[in-house]
Image (cartoon, rainbow, N blue to C red):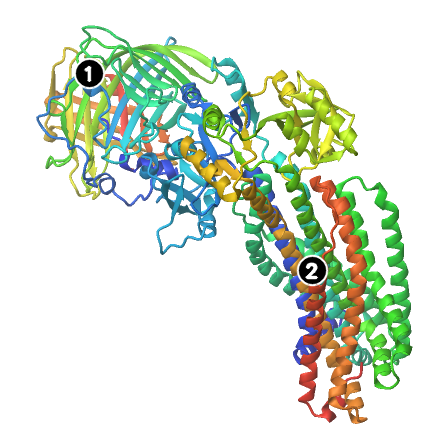
């Protein structure tokens, strides 16, 4: 799973450009507001591809979210992120026939993280009723675009990813740029219960959620005037819903882990606004051959071991994870402790390394701090 | 005890004195307050406007660095270029703009852009926009207009009723945003509504690009975008507008300074009067052992205190004054120069500047007075005769100085080439005029004395001469204000007349239509089918550059059909019909160019001079031509040039005409309006695209009236300040004369005669001042018209004298004096004669 803080507040943030509004407001209060008219996430709905790779404008929010753990030819470790968000401002399509008129708003984030450096960038655009629109999601072949940032899938018959991969991802900003070639032979993994992912214990809040955590990456990264060849692994999350958190939820800690045995592990906890509230845990172990199994909440134990004070808040950047049923005892440490995304919405997101009963790399996202 | 301590004690004595005679301190404070109010009020207004030019960006967006537009006036771009630029990663903003008319015939400037791109144009700090901004409604294309809070109120909307505006048959809801979002006077719409409303679906007026201009240019050059034939212009941070409006602001400043001067006259008069009243008190202080230094120190401290208090009060009033003046200035700048004014912020530095200037002026004026007073012998009392002799000498010297300055002005007049020099000449004249007054008053009264019947009338006139000295300063201030008012009224009246005459020649068609380049052929076809008999006149327009030597000037390049060029050009040069006919033939053959008067003055060129026509400001491939004529133009301060179609085509300028005019419509205004409506309906044009001659005339005069409203208001304020000064001076004078008047009464002069005498004396002095103001005001007006306005705006104006306006200001001055005399007389009549006899003698 890959959540994003205060997503329905994004239109507001577009206007004000403020950093997180009121610290005292819980994430649940912000994201939990029910809105009539939007499509609801229901259990038992089968996801269909390639249709579900495209946008779901009837739902309030959605994202295409890629994180990658890479290394340069000389062995330097780095991480990068690209996300395109879609936010529907109303449930109904506008009456105005102008191609400019619409109810969809797009935002994209990108980051490039080295041990001592961290670059971030952001783009915004409006959804339009024209093929030429600079912000759009179209296909097949799948195109996820905001200005000159784009995910472009290449046609490849019989690919197990149903039109998602192979693809090229291009991001250019003033300080950095990257162009990645992405491919995967492993099938897509449906998170939660066949793609229906609960976000609260009572099951009132949920999303549709699938992932491709076994992506092979090869490409070029540019920063500070020079270009470097990079390779490594990446993880793509696709998720959409109309209501994200319950009113009582404050934020989340999300882990995307590539273990050395070739498996991947997705874990998250949703924290309550009251520190006495028990967090909601969820997790899944995934294998390249398509096998996967969910973890029971009682079998997930996570504990922060180190904190980092940043300009936008204090974040728990090191963790100890204990998963007895998986026989995993993992220590998580960040590649760069200051991997804050100081954008319209501020959060911490960065590459991590894994030690303990297994070695590996991955990504950590921390919100609501 | 040291001097500081003694000085402080003396100051406390003065304060006790002012508690007894608040009118004296009040008069000084009033002068300072009025002076500072007008000085800072005008400064704040000017500063805000200039600041706006520099910082005004696109509506709700940052200031752009580069603009891409199509060549040809009102030409548009295909919106696909914007999409391509975005896909190239450029921070860009698509803009559509135009003018529309509402159902009541009011014109509105519409600015439309992509709201998301606008808000995201800010790289770093974004302004705090009200979180209530209806983003969903804007994005989904609801008919919604955003305006600033000030504009919302200016449009007559209140928070109590729904605000709506009907444009192009669409009812739009108007919502206001805080002034801090820098919308200025613009009407902002999202592009999804603005495009269809302006009939520009799929088209853009221009694209604004954000970021480093040099980098952007490089990016554009390296891209394979279809930019051929498009204009790429760089942001000049308001430089062009600041240059263009320089004269306007200089004029406002000059008027602010004049008002400041008039205010200072009042303050100075107050200081003199209060010193006169305290002479005995000061002698007593000196006799009691106060050192001369301590006395001087106390007087300086008093002045400092009064200037401090007065400046602060003036500063507060100035902010309010500026608040009132700004909408007026905004209208002028918007209509005349197309500027957008943003809300301004006041600065403490204005207070320090105002107070500093006032203090310097007050010290310069008062220190000699203080010095004189402090040097007086302790044994010496008030010597009236010696004082009168001194005043006479001073008046004579002032007169000589005034005459010298007048002569200097006359000598320098032919050498003044620039607007600023002419303003300086006017400054000389302004100083000279009041210097002449006291002596002229004295002399006129001396000449009048023997003509008056013996007895009380002759006594009255003889005494008026003695009153000249105490009244001189107030009269000088009045003279200044009167002259400025007469001059300004002359300018406005003359311009009105000139503009009307010019419009009569310039407007030869009945109906003017501006359909947009895409609709011109449809309009022609419609006219072929429905009104083939009506003569048609065409006009082409395109932004272009002309160069003379190293000076490259952006102009509006025009072309007209042959008949229009021959019949509607109102020539300044050459003189004579034959020469003008030859000039027209020269231009029609493509061998010459006509330029507007403002452009000719700006480039300092004349008929026969060579000029280069250039596509851009670099002027790389110029077309050389010669100036065949200079024509009057009161509509476009930017500068215009007119060429014939022959040359227009040679320069590969846009082929479709910009506007089309129809003549020969029979059946009066109703038939003209009817045809206009038919055309609008048939082609789906909005009312702002069709104008009848009558409508143009009305609008031109309306704009003209608004242009001068700010200057007229400032002038009236100056006159008001002078009137207040005169009122306070006469009030103080009449009050100080209670003792001699009581003597006259005790000698048997009836109360009624006494009243008549007092009124007559003051009115006589004012009348002489008004008479002097007549020629001096006319001279000032002449300078204003034939030098300042001509050089500042490039407008030749025929001088026209407005007697009605003259009598109005004379009436105002007399009314003010009447009130100022009657009030103390009324007070006096309520006091016993004994108490009046005990009053201090002047």
Element carrying mark 1: loop
What is the spatial separation of the Cα atoms under label 1 and label 2, in whole angstroms? Answer: 82 Å
Locate residue A190: give its quadrant: top left
Percent position of residue A59, x then y = 21, 31
Q: Is residue B234 above or below residue B410?
A: above
Residue B278 shows in the view: no
What residue is at 77 percent from the left and 84 percent from the top? Answer: B840
Question: What's the chain of the residue with tag 2?
Answer: B
Question: What's the chain of the residue with tag 1?
Answer: A
**Horizontally, is A276 left or right of A364 in the view?**
left
Element carrying mark 2: helix
Percent position of residue B706, x then y = 59, 49
| 1 and 2 marks on the same chain | no
Crowd around label 1: few <14 · some 14–19 · many ≥20 (10 Å): some
Quadrant (top left, top right, bottom left, bottom right) of the N terminus of chain A? top left
Locate residue B526: give its quadrant: top left
What residue is at 52 percent from the left and 39 percent from the top? Answer: B691
The residue under label 1 is A50
Cβ atoms under marks 1 and 2 closer than 8 Å: no
**Horizontally, is B606 left or right of A289 in the view?**
right
Locate residue B650: give its quadrant: top right
What residue is at 64 percent from the left and 37 percent from the top? Answer: B506
Percent position of residue B91, x then y = 45, 26
The residue under label 2 is B805
Foreground: B530 or A292? B530
Q: Is residue B350 above or below residue B522?
A: below
Foreground: B555 or B579? B579
Percent position of residue B586, x then y = 73, 22
Q: Is residue B817 above or below residue A366?
A: below
Crowd around label 2: few <14 · some 14–19 · many ≥20 (10 Å): some
């Amino acid at each position: 799973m890959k959540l994003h803080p205060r997503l329905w507040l994004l239109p507001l943030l577009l206007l004000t450009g403020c950093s997180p509004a009121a610290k005292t407001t819980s994430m649940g209060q912000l994201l939990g507001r029910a809105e009539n008219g939007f499509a609801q996430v229901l259990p038992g709905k089968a996801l269909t591809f390639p249709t579900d790779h495209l946008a779901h404008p009837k739902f309030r929010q959605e994202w295409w979210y890629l994180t990658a753990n890479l290394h340069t030819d000389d062995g330097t470790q780095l991480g990068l992120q690209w996300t395109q968000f879609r936010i529907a401002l109303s449930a109904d399509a506008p009456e105005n026939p102008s191609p400019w008129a619409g109810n969809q708003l797009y935002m994209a984030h990108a980051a490039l993280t080295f041990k001592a450096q961290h670059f971030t960038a952001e783009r915004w655009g409006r959804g339009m009723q024209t093929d030429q629109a600079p912000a759009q999601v179209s296909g097949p072949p799948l195109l996820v675009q905001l200005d000159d940032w784009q995910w472009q899938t290449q046609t490849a018959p019989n690919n197990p990813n149903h039109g998602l991969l192979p693809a090229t991802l291009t991001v250019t900003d003033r300080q950095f740029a990257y162009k990645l070639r992405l491919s995967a032979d492993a099938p897509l993994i449906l998170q939660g219960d066949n793609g229906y992912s609960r976000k609260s214990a009572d099951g009132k809040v949920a999303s549709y959620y699938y992932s491709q955590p076994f992506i092979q990456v090869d490409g070029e990264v540019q920063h500070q005037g020079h270009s470097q060849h990079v390779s490594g692994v990446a993880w793509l999350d696709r998720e959409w819903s109309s209501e994200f958190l319950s009113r009582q939820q404050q934020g989340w800690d999300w882990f995307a882990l590539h273990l050395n045995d070739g498996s991947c592990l997705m874990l998250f906890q949703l924290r309550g606004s009251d520190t006495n509230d028990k967090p909601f845990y969820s997790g899944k172990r995934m294998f390249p051959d398509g096998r996967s199994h969910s973890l029971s909440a009682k079998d997930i134990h996570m504990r922060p071991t180190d904190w980092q004070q940043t300009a936008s808040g204090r974040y728990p950047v090191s963790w100890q994870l204990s998963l007895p049923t998986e026989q995993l005892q993992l220590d998580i440490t960040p590649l760069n402790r200051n991997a804050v995304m100081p954008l319209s919405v501020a959060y911490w997101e960065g590459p991590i390394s894994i030690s303990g009963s297994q070695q590996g790399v991955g990504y950590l996202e921390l919100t609501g701090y | 005890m040291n001097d500081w301590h003694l000085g402080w004690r003396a100051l406390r004595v003065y304060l006790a004195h002012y508690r007894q005679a608040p009118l004296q301190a009040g008069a000084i404070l009033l002068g300072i307050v009025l002076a500072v109010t007008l000085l800072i009020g005008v400064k704040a207004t000017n500063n805000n406007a200039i600041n706006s030019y520099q910082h005004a960006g696109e509506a709700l967006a940052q200031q752009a660095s580069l603009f891409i537009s199509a060549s040809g006036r009102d030409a548009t771009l295909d919106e696909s270029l914007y999409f391509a630029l975005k896909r190239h990663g450029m921070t860009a903003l698509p803009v559509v703009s135009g003018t529309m008319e509402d159902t009541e015939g009011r014109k509105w400037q519409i600015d439309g852009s992509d709201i998301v791109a606008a808000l995201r144009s800010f790289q770093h700090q974004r302004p705090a926009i009200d979180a209530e901004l209806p983003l969903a409604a804007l994005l989904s294309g609801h008919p919604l207009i955003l305006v600033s809070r000030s504009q919302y109120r200016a449009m007559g909307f209140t928070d109590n009723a729904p605000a709506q505006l009907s444009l192009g048959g669409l009812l739009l809801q108007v919502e206001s945003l805080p002034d801090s979002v820098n919308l200025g006077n613009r009407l902002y719409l999202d592009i999804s509504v603005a495009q269809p409303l302006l009939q520009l679906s799929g088209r853009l007026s221009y694209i604004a690009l954000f970021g480093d201009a040099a980098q952007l240019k490089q990016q554009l050059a390296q891209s394979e975008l279809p930019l051929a034939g498009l204009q790429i212009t760089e942001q000049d941070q308001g430089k062009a507008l600041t240059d263009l409006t320089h004269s306007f602001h200089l004029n406002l400043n000059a008027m602010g300074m004049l008002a400041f001067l008039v205010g200072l006259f009042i303050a100075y008069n107050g200081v003199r009067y209060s010193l006169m009243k305290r002479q005995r008190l000061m002698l007593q202080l000196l006799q009691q052992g106060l050192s001369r230094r301590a006395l001087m120190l106390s007087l300086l401290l008093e002045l400092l205190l009064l200037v401090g208090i007065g400046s602060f009060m003036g500063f507060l009033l100035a902010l309010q004054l500026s608040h009132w003046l700004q909408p007026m200035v905004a209208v002028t700048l918007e209509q005349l120069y197309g500027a957008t004014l943003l809300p301004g912020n006041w600065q403490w530095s204005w207070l320090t500047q105002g107070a500093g200037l006032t203090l310097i002026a007050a010290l310069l004026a008062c220190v000699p007075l203080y010095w004189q007073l402090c040097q007086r012998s302790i044994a010496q009392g008030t010597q009236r005769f010696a004082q009168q002799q001194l005043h006479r000498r001073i008046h004579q010297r002032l007169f000589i100085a005034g005459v010298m300055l007048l002569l200097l002005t006359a000598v320098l007049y032919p050498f003044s080439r620039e607007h600023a020099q002419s303003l300086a000449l006017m400054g000389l004249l302004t100083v000279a005029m009041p210097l002449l007054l006291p002596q002229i008053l004295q002399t006129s009264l001396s000449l009048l004395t023997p003509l008056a019947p013996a007895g009380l009338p002759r006594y009255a006139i003889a005494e008026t001469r003695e009153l000249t000295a105490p009244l001189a300063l107030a009269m000088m201030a009045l003279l200044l204000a009167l002259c400025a008012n007469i001059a300004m009224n002359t300018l406005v009246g003359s311009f009105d007349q000139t503009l009307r005459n010019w419009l009569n020649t310039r407007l030869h068609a009945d109906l003017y239509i501006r359909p947009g380049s895409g609709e011109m052929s449809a309009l022609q076809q419609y006219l072929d089918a429905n009104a083939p008999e009506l003569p048609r006149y065409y006009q082409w327009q395109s932004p272009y550059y002309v160069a003379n030597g190293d000076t490259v000037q952006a102009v509006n390049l025009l072309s007209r059909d042959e008949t229009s060029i021959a019949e509607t050009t109102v020539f300044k040069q050459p003189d004579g019909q034959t020469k003008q006919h030859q000039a027209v033939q020269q231009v029609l053959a493509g061998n010459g160019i006509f330029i507007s008067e403002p452009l000719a003055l700006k480039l300092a060129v004349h008929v026969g001079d060579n000029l280069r026509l250039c596509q851009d400001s670099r002027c790389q491939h110029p077309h050389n031509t010669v100036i065949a004529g200079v024509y009057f133009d009161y509509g476009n301060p930017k500068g215009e040039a007119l060429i014939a179609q022959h040359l227009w085509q040679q320069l590969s300028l846009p082929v479709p005409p910009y506007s089309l005019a129809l003549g020969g419509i029979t059946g009066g205004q109703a038939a003209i309006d009817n045809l206009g409506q038919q055309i609008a309906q048939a082609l789906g044009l909005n009312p702002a695209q069709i104008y009848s001659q009558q409508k143009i005339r009305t609008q031109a005069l309306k704009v003209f009236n608004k242009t001068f409203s700010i200057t007229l208001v400032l002038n009236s304020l100056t006159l008001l300040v002078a009137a207040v000064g005169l009122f306070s001076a006469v009030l103080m004078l009449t009050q100080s004369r209670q003792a001699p008047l009581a003597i006259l009464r005790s000698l048997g002069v009836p109360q009624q005669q006494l009243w008549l005498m007092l009124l007559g004396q003051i009115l006589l002095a004012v009348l002489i001042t008004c008479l002097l103001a007549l020629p001096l005001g006319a001279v000032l007006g002449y300078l204003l018209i034939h030098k300042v306005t001509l050089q500042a705006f490039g407008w030749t104006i025929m001088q026209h004298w407005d007697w009605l306006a003259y009598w109005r200001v004379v009436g105002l001055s007399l009314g003010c004096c009447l009130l100022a005399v009657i009030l103390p007389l009324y007070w006096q009549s309520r006091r016993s004669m004994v108490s009046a006899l005990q009053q201090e003698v002047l």
